[in-house]
Amino acid sequence: MKLINVTNSHSRLVMQQLENTDAEMVKVYTAGDITVVYTVAPTHYEILLINKKRAIKPSEIEDIRAYFLKKIPSENYNTSEISMIQTPGLVEISIPRTNTINR
């Protein structure tokens, strides 16, 4: 699965996230008909997968999750603390940061 950075096409969403949440960085990607919003905040990382046309497949969730976990230094999170909320067209993956003091 190939993720394409389309953050520039979603500037309004990015600005709203930065203004209204604790987010420090927001990037938007597309993987076919799945939109992925990746957020970095002082205490956590968030990966939001959205598909308005169909349910998101478990293999797609795992591929996207693995892609972003490679980008995060392994000492910044504990795999056992990762939580996921799933509905048919929406998946939220929350990754608490383990070293929020020494950033």
Image: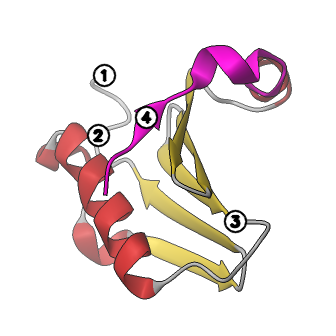
Crowd around label 2: few <14 · some 14–19 · many ≥20 (10 Å): few
Q: Give the labeled residue for mark 1.
A: 103
Amino acid type of the residue that numbered disc 2 sits on in the rendered structure:
Asn
The image shows residue 95 at horizontal and vertical percentages of 43, 58
Q: Secondary structure at mark 4?
A: strand
Q: CA distance from mark 3 to mark 1?
A: 33 Å
- Single out the mark in the foreground, 4 or 2: 4
Q: Give the labeled residue for mark 4.
A: 4
Q: Nearer the viewer, residue 103 or 41?
A: 41
Which image quarter holds the N terminus? bottom left
Mark linked to residue 82: none
The image shows residue 37 at horizontal and vertical percentages of 60, 43
Amino acid type of the residue that numbered disc 3 sits on in the rendered structure:
Asn
Q: Decide: marks 2, 1 in contact (CB < 8 A)?
A: yes
- Ranked by sequence position, the earlier of labels 3 and 1 is 3
Q: Secondary structure at mark 3?
A: loop
